[in-house]
Image (cartoon, helix red, strand yellow):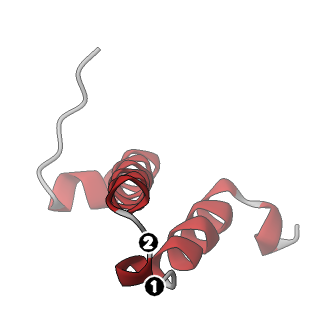
Amino acid sequence: MNPRNTPGYRMHRALSNLSSIDVDRLDLDDQERIDESMTLLEQVSLLTRPDAAKEANVQVES
């Protein structure tokens, strides 16, 4: 199985790409979108890795 086809890899790449954007050159609305996107990706990453969720003391509401 190609590791690039895993959801964890895709989330990591998306987060990495967002992190590399020079947000200082963007307008305020775009900066907020980038920040929100990064936060959501980090939260999803925690939910897809049960051990990380335990370490971060994250609880999932249903």
Q: Amino acid at mark 1?
A: Asp
At a point 63% along the width and 73% down the height, the residue shown is: 13
At a point 26% along the width and 52% down the height, the residue shown is: 53
Residue 50, given in percent of the width and then of the height, sits at 36, 50
- Element type where label 2 sits in the image: loop
Residue furthest out toward the left: 57
Q: Is residue 9 left or right of residue 34?
A: right
- Please name whichever residue, 26 or 33, is drawn nearer the observer in this view of the structure: 26
At a point 66% along the width and 55% down the height, the residue shown is: 7
At a point 43% along the width and 81% down the height, the residue shown is: 25
State the CA–CA distance, disc 1 to disc 2.
7 Å
Residue 28, given in percent of the width and then of the height, sits at 32, 60
Asked if 34 appears above or below 24 in the picture, the reply is above
The image quarter containing residue 35 is bottom left
Q: Is residue 2 left or right of residue 47?
A: right
**Which quadrant is home to the N terminus?**
bottom right
Q: Residues within 10 Å of mark 1 (few under 14, many from 20)?
A: few
Residue 9, given in percent of the width and then of the height, sits at 65, 68
Q: Amino acid at mark 2?
A: Leu
Specify the label residue 10 is tagged with.
none
- Please name whichever residue, 31 or 45, is drawn nearer the observer in this view of the structure: 31
Residue identifier under label 2: 26
Residue identifier under label 1: 22
Q: Disc 1, disc 2: CB below 8 Å?
A: yes
- Element type where label 1 sits in the image: loop
Asked if 17 appears above or below 40 in the picture, the reply is below
Q: Residues within 10 Å of mark 2 (few under 14, many from 20)?
A: few
